[in-house]
Every structure is written in structure tokens, then in C-alpha cells.
Image (spheres, rainbow, N blue to C red):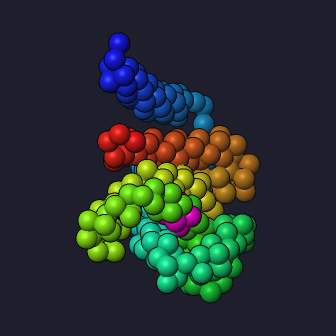
Amino acid sequence: MTDAAVEARVTTVGGAATWKGLIVQPAAIAAVLAGFLVWLNLAPLTASERSTLDPASLWGSTLEHLSLTFVAASIVLVIAIPLGVLLTRPALRRLRGPVLFIANFGQAAPAIGMIVLLAMLITSGYWASIVALVIYAALPVLRNTVIGILGVDSSLVEAGRGMGMSAASVLFRVELPLAVPVMLAGIRTALVLLVGAAALAAFVNGGGLGLLITTGVNLYLFSVLISGALLIALLALTIDWLGRVVEHVARPKGL
């Protein structure tokens, strides 16, 4: 068997294994969700539990949770990706350490404390939560953008410059496309972090599925508490799966 044939076989087997993994996860999520819905319809719940776990209420809380997640994620992308690119440029390279240190501090700070503190400064619990989530989730995107661009083979960059490409052309046609897999991994990590941290918005009237957890704790409704934790976990796994699909599709050929 020739080297080309071996390489093609490895690529085919690796791709099949990847797609098999991408199919198993959503199937497991759907099975758990179906089991939860069956339990919700058949379980002997009290009036308070039935009211809190009303499907319309759950759907509204899920939409609020998704809003918190994706609004915060959009702001993170708009800020962290351009900043990460700038920190790889020679003129701003000396600022890379201090900026990453500040981003590390933002993620190291307790998320609940940050949300409560910002709620004292921002009257809207929703926007206080958004600001806290942006600070909390900026690091993975910023760090992976920097690592991805710096990890591009310098010979490819020099080859682009040798062909007469401008610095901007090298960035957009060589560095960023090759950095995409690492950058997407950072974005996926940030999204999963946001889904989990968005549960804390309930402590400042920010909405989301975290309300089920706080209600379950305050009223000793453990079925409500567990339902909230389960739905947030399923949401995080779904977001993680979507991120993996995007990573697989957007990965440059040959990587």
C-alpha cells in the first residue's frame, strides 16, 4: 500500500470516528431530555413543584438563559478576538503579559461575587449579569486567539511576505485561517463556561434557569433544584456539541 493510500485510509477512519462521536452526544442528550419530560408528566409533584416546572415557564427560563449566554458571548467575541490579534502584532507585543494577567484575574474572581458586586452598580440585574459573564469568559477566547496566531509556522508567514503580501493580507489569508481550530476551541470553552455561570444571574434577578435552583434551595423543593441543574447541564452539553460540529466543519483541510 502506497503512502498516499495509507494517509487516505487514516483520514477516512479518523473522520468516521469523529462523526460517530458527534452523533452519540446529541443522541444521549435527547434520550436524557425525553426521560426528564416523561418524568415531568408522570411524577407525583406538589402544586408548588408543578407550577414551577410548568413547561411554558421552563421554556421561558431556557430562552432567558440562552439570551444571557449568547449576548455575553457576542460581546466577548467582539472584544477578545480583535484584542488577541492586536497583542500578536510587534507594536503591542509587550502588552501581552499584562493584558492576559488582567484576563486571568477576571476568571479567577468568584463569578457569584462579581455578579452581586456589579448588581450594586448596575440597576438592571440582566445587564449586571451580562457584564460579569463577559469578564468571566473573556480569557479562553483571548488566550486561544493569541496562542493560535503565534502557533502558525513562521516559515509560512515569511513565505507570504516573500510573495509580496501586505501585513494585513498575511494576517487574514495565512495566520487567521491556520489559527481557526485553536480559536474555535477557545470559543467553545467560553460558551460552556457561560452556560454554567449564567445560572448565577438568578441571584440578582437576571433570569435564566438558575431560578429553578434558587427556588429549589429556598423552598426545599429538591425535584425543582435537580431539574434546574439537569436542564443547565443538558444545555451546556448541547452548546458543547454544536461547538464541536463547527470546529469540525470549519477546520482547514489537511489539519
- Residue 208 visible in the snapshot: no
- Residue 2 visible in the snapshot: yes
User: 176 and 140: which one is in front?
Assistant: 176
User: 219 and 155: which one is in front?
Assistant: 155
Q: Which residues are magenta?
A: 141-146
View extreme (top): residue: 1
View extreme (left): residue: 164
What residue appears at the point 40 percent right and 42 percent down from the top-left corner? 255
Question: Is 168 contained in the magenta span?
Answer: no
Task: Where is residue 253? Give x, y as percent.
Answer: 32, 42
Horizontal side, residue 235 vs residue 12: left or right: right
Task: Where is residue 198? Give x, y as percent.
Answer: 57, 61
* In this view, 36 is above or below 67: above
Task: Where is residue 51? Give x, y as percent.
Answer: 53, 48
Question: Is 144 contained in the magenta span?
Answer: yes
What residue appears at the point 39 percent right and 54 percent down from the top-left corner? 178
What residue appears at the point 66 percent right and 84 percent down from the top-left corner? 120
User: 128 and 208: which one is in front?
Assistant: 128
View extreme (bottom): residue: 121
